[in-house]
Image (spheres, rainbow, N blue to C red):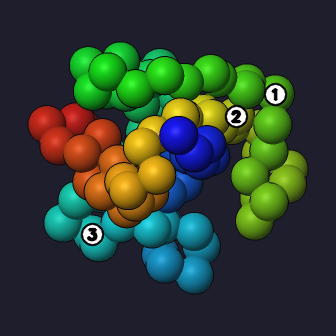
Amino acid sequence: MKEMIIWPAYIDLKRTKNEGRKVPKEFAVQNPKLKDIAGKLKKMGLEYSIEHKKSYPKDPWEICGYIKVKADKRTSKLQILKEICKNMG
């Protein structure tokens, strides 16, 4: 297992790639929330923990939190992000 950090910015439609979005626009969602991401991770059967009082490094003034996910070593972050985005928003 490996741990990875998922910030809401990674799947946020309003962000550009330079602003931190990691998924293509066709997968991105509007205004992603930690609880929605956590709900998707739960449905995916992944173990996770939420860190609420953290700020995204590219926006240090905005406290949005992140989710730490434990995933199989063969699974990429992009695969997980795309799966989170499915049927969301």
Q: Is residue 16 above or below residue 59?
A: below
Badge 2 element? loop
- Percent across and percent down for residue 81 are 36, 51
At 22% across and 36% down in the image, what residue appears?
88
Q: Residues within 10 Å of mark 1 (few under 14, many from 20)?
A: few
* Residue tagged 1: 53
Q: Residue at x 81, y 27 (%)?
A: 53
Q: Rounded to the nearest whole Å, what is the CA distance between mark 1 and mark 2?
A: 5 Å
Separation (CA) of disc 3 from disc 1: 27 Å
The residue that label 2 is drawn on is 65
Q: Is residue 78 left or right of residue 1?
A: left
Q: Are marks 1 and 2 in contact (CB under 8 Å)?
A: yes
Q: Earlier in the sequence, mark 1 or mark 2?
A: 1
Residue holding disc 3 = 25
How many neighbours does mark 2 have within 10 angstroms: few (below 14), some (14-19), or many (20 or more)? Answer: some
Above or below, 25 against 31 in this view is: below
The amino acid marked with disc number 3 is Lys
Mark 3 or mark 2: which comes first in sequence? 3
Across and down, in percent, residue 13 comes to 36, 59
- Using the image, tell me which numbered label, if any, was put on residue 16: none
| Secondary structure beneath label 3 | loop
Name the residue: 60% across, 33% down. 67
Confirm whether residue 45 shows in the render.
yes
- Tell me which label, 3 or 1, sits earlier in the chain: 3
Compared to 71, does 15 lie above or below?
below
| Residue extending furthest toward the bottom | 18
